[in-house]
Image (cartoon, rainbow, N blue to C red):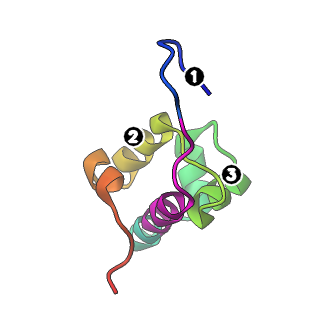
Amino acid sequence: MKNATNHTISAPHPCLTEELGFLIQKERIKAGLSLKEVCEYLTDVSVETLKLYESGRKSIPLKNIYALSNFLNISPQTIMKYTGPSK
């Protein structure tokens, strides 16, 4: 797939999508928020879609990464650099 400037865009690596979903879920739970509460904030994301994000079965669009980072009170840089749970 190519973007408007003719650069190739590739899908995120499946492991990164899973790790990102894990972080979002962990932070949501830590904040004591339900899936529904997060979806009410995002407005254009259903509970089913959020479940797909958290399970790593669907990539999270950049605009939602920024919205989630704001709502969960974590920096977008933390989300983007996340490499998974500590072993």
- The quarter of the displayed image where residue 81 is located: bottom left
Q: Secondary structure at mark 2?
A: helix
Q: Which residue is mark 3?
A: 49
Q: Is residue 5 left or right of residue 50?
A: left
Q: Which residue is mark 1?
A: 2
Q: Is residue 42 left or right of residue 79?
A: right
Q: Earlier in the sequence, mark 3 or mark 2?
A: 3
15 versus 63 height, above or below: below
Which label sits in the foreground, 2 or 1? 1
The x, y position of residue 57, in whole percent, is 66, 59
The amino acid at mark 2 is: Tyr
Task: Please say whether residue 13 is one of the residues in the magenta stretch.
Answer: yes
Q: Are the residues at dot 2 and dot 1 in contact (C-beta closer than 8 Å)?
A: no
Q: Quadrant of the C terminus?
A: bottom left
Q: Which one is nearer the viewer's eye here, 1 or 49?
A: 1
Q: Which one is nearer the viewer's eye here, 52 or 44?
A: 52
Q: Which residue is mark 2?
A: 66
The x, y position of residue 51, in whole percent, is 65, 61
Asked whether residue 38 is in view, the answer is yes
Q: Is residue 86 left or right of residue 27?
A: left
What is the CA distance from the residue labelled 2 to the residue labelled 1? 23 Å
Task: Please say whether residue 58 is one of the residues in the magenta stretch.
Answer: no
In the picture as drawn, the residue positioned furthest to the top comes out as 5
The x, y position of residue 1, in whole percent, is 62, 28
Q: Are the residues at dot 3 and dot 1 in contact (C-beta closer than 8 Å)?
A: no
9 versus 22 height, above or below: above
Asked whether residue 73 is in view, the answer is no
Question: What segment is highlighted magenta in the picture?
Answer: 10-25
Q: Secondary structure at mark 1?
A: loop
Looking at the image, which residue is at 37% across and 77% down?
85
